[in-house]
Amino acid sequence: MQSIQQTFRVDYSYKVFFTRSLFNPSNPEFRNYLASQVTQGLTKKLLFILDDGVAKAHPALTTAITAYLQQIEGFKIAGDVILVPGGEACKNDQELFYSLIDQIDGQGIDRHSFVVAIGGGAVLDLVGMVAAVSHRGVRHIRIPTTVLSQNDSGVGVKNGVNYRGKKNFLGTFAPPAAVFNDAEFLTTLEERDWRSGISEAVKVALIKDAAFFEWLEANAQALVKNDLPVMQELVYRCAALHMAHIGGSGDPFESGSSRPLDFGHWSAHKLEQLTDFTLRHGEAVSIGIAVDSVYSSLLGWIDAAAAERIVRLLINLQLPVYHSLLDTQNGVSSAVIKGLQEFREHLGGRLTICLLKAIGQGAEVHVIDEVLLNKAIAHLKVNYESI
Amino acid sequence: MQSIQQTFRVDYSYKVFFTRSLFNPSNPEFRNYLASQVTQGLTKKLLFILDDGVAKAHPALTTAITAYLQQIEGFKIAGDVILVPGGEACKNDQELFYSLIDQIDGQGIDRHSFVVAIGGGAVLDLVGMVAAVSHRGVRHIRIPTTVLSQNDSGVGVKNGVNYRGKKNFLGTFAPPAAVFNDAEFLTTLEERDWRSGISEAVKVALIKDAAFFEWLEANAQALVKNDLPVMQELVYRCAALHMAHIGGSGDPFESGSSRPLDFGHWSAHKLEQLTDFTLRHGEAVSIGIAVDSVYSSLLGWIDAAAAERIVRLLINLQLPVYHSLLDTQNGVSSAVIKGLQEFREHLGGRLTICLLKAIGQGAEVHVIDEVLLNKAIAHLKVNYESI
Ligand SMILES: NC(=O)c1ccc[n+]([C@@H]2O[C@H](COP(=O)([O-])OP(=O)(O)OC[C@H]3O[C@@H](n4cnc5c(N)ncnc54)[C@H](O)[C@@H]3O)[C@@H](O)[C@H]2O)c1
Ligand SMILES: NC(=O)c1ccc[n+]([C@@H]2O[C@H](COP(=O)([O-])OP(=O)(O)OC[C@H]3O[C@@H](n4cnc5c(N)ncnc54)[C@H](O)[C@@H]3O)[C@@H](O)[C@H]2O)c1
Ligand SMILES: [Zn+2]
Ligand SMILES: [Zn+2]
């Protein structure tokens, strides 16, 4: 029989800018970027969508944006800046999703226009999805405003919304047109949001970069004391490692099973869900890192001292390392662990999970030993539950 | 200020198979393909979604599918074959869209599984979109059952659904895992569906391949007389040209403005919409080809005889070449033409439209002369309205 083989490559490229006070008239970054995107004969539109938590903390922002964009050749701002509720709730709200699609339609946003999202990871995920499916993909610019979104979610290639309570059930891989990390936003974060994004830095250090791990140890106190320049360095280094992995992995859109950036995440995802998302993503990841690090040591992959050092760092960063939902009940494994086994069955028997071969080096397993895992959890419970 | 440049490439590849009676136990094609997709330790699921127009015309199909798949190692069929209404209506139905998402969820379809869509272009577009946004992209296999979907829409990289009456307002670029063109399906098409898909072959011949255009002229009578082997050759050649363009264009996901495969389509899209989709896509494209060919001759790009030859071929294929909605009313341009001018304004002044430099060679313009365009339409009206 005849057949035709189709093969092609698509090149993706975008820049992540690190700056401060992006819409200050004297800051040329955004203006310069737009200038690089001008097409002779076209007037391109910019549709701004803003996290209302950010708007509250930065009441002059909307005016600053409008003023900044007044005089930019080849571009015009479409309608008013649209406010959306920040935080996970916005990813559960189908009506909100379609109201943003209506804005794309009503404002005549097409594949020459840009949607600009300003907010935490949740708002960026929602708006990224809206842009990705409108007209088969409208360009979108991300302006992440939390530690987590500046060092991890906002610089990557994924978006998503929740469906019937299932986290990120709907989403796509859709690289942004550009990302602007503005450090100024980090100054107004709640304590918990400032801290919880740090766990992604610990994660990527553990699987990729021992020197960065040591840097985190050396700077834990400064980070806890809200030292902004130290946080800026953390964000930069973490974003760089995260992006280097995506760009260098050979599988940026995760068509295979291997996902080292999900180190510590299998239990984190389950914990977030079981706590109805009262646990922040970064907090859950911190616990997940602790579990998988101790498990790695019980496997003999890293020594006990290394695991202890990791857990210590998380604690020094004032991040949680244990949750009662992990615990066995009368000798029966917790829902978190059962979830993992269900997932394994669902796949037909074979998991792919990243663990630690060393501080700074991840490696994969396809089987998790339930007895050993419960031992790791018990170890965390006995030693750190009260912290 | 600091910045990080992200750059990566994604390789896409899929095969389009040309076969007959795909689920006949003696046909090894589908079995062989699945064998190439086995992963040690995983049992992969196949979720079948079937166009009910196809199911009606092929009542033994569901049983044949189930029987065919009974014994295939490493795979299992998930639930029952799901029937969906065929034709454009399925792309307007948001409830249907979410009921398919619910099936993905309920049947535990993940990124190791496959969604298999069997049907016309409309069902393939709907299911392609469902698969593309579930879990950030589930693999999908297409089994197109119309001429249009076998030679054009089903072998390409786009999907889409309509939103608030706007054609393909929501969609993505998402290449299939594989495509199986089964000629058997073509034998049960309504006359109109058999014929209308031929216009995409005329289109791609005109912009790419003069020899194929001559072949179409030579075989027009056989095509009109439902000669299946001739149609199979048409489908193969058209699909090959279509795919070669996508794979060789350097812009498979249409990030730029150039879209030669949309030759004849600017007016076709508008006509489909204005007739509430009572005009088939292929019929509208035939009219669009006629308009843009005559316009190309009035521009002096091709001679009048070439335009006449093109229109003649369409007529010999029993395809329409004129529609009253194109006509000026008391000297005022039709809604079709006004739509083009609105679109130009929307873009900020600059269109990109493919016309003909010769039979077999497309070329782009950025301006359309309204007076000349009305002349082209008048020419078609005077000479061919009554045909
Ligand atoms: N796409 C990805 O690859 C990826 C990766 C990891 C996490 N995520 C997603 O990211 C989300 C979590 O994002 P997050 O941690 O940034 O939190 P968030 O988006 O949930 O925001 C938390 C709160 O902070 C507020 N806020 C945001 N910026 C602020 C600022 N500068 N000042 C004051 N308040 C501010 C928000 O309004 C919200 O109330 C989750 O939905 C998670 O699924 C996505
Ligand atoms: N994704 C793309 O790149 C792309 C390109 C062009 C067109 N399209 C889309 O394709 C759609 C049109 O597709 P189409 O022309 O295949 O028509 P269709 O899918 O609308 O089907 C037409 C009718 O034929 C029936 N049918 C399908 N196969 C049959 C068979 N073998 N025997 C008997 N009946 C059968 C269907 O049930 C339906 O009633 C439009 O929605 C258009 O937007 C998509
Ligand atoms: Zn994370
Ligand atoms: Zn077409």
Image (spheres, coloured by chain):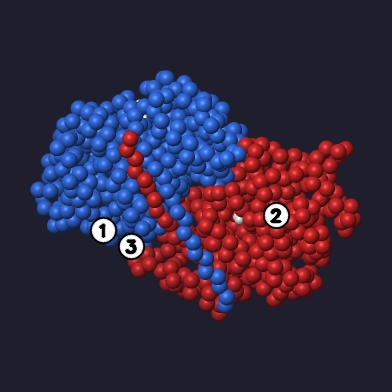
Chain colours: A blue, B red
Does residue B125 sit above or below A286 in this rendering?
below
Residue B62 visible in image: no
Q: Which residue position holds label 1?
A: A364
Which label lies toward us, 1 or 3?
1
Instruction: Determine the secondary structure under disc 2.
Output: strand
**Co-location on one chain, circles 1 and 3:** yes
Which of A16 and B2 lies nearest the eye of the viewer? Answer: B2
Q: Which amino acid type is marked by label 1?
A: Glu
Instruction: Name the chain under label 3.
Output: A
Residue at 38% of width from left, 67% of height from top? B39
Image x and y of residue B333, in percent: 80, 40
Residue at 64% of width from left, 51% of height from top? B90
Instruction: Name the chain under label 2.
Output: B
Which label lies toward us, 1 or 2?
2
Residue at 30% of width from left, 31% of height from top? A193
Whether disc 3's CB lies below 8 Å from ligand 3 is answered no
Q: Which residue position holds label 2?
A: B355
**Pointer 1 or 3: first along the chain:** 3
Which quadrant holds residue A146? top left
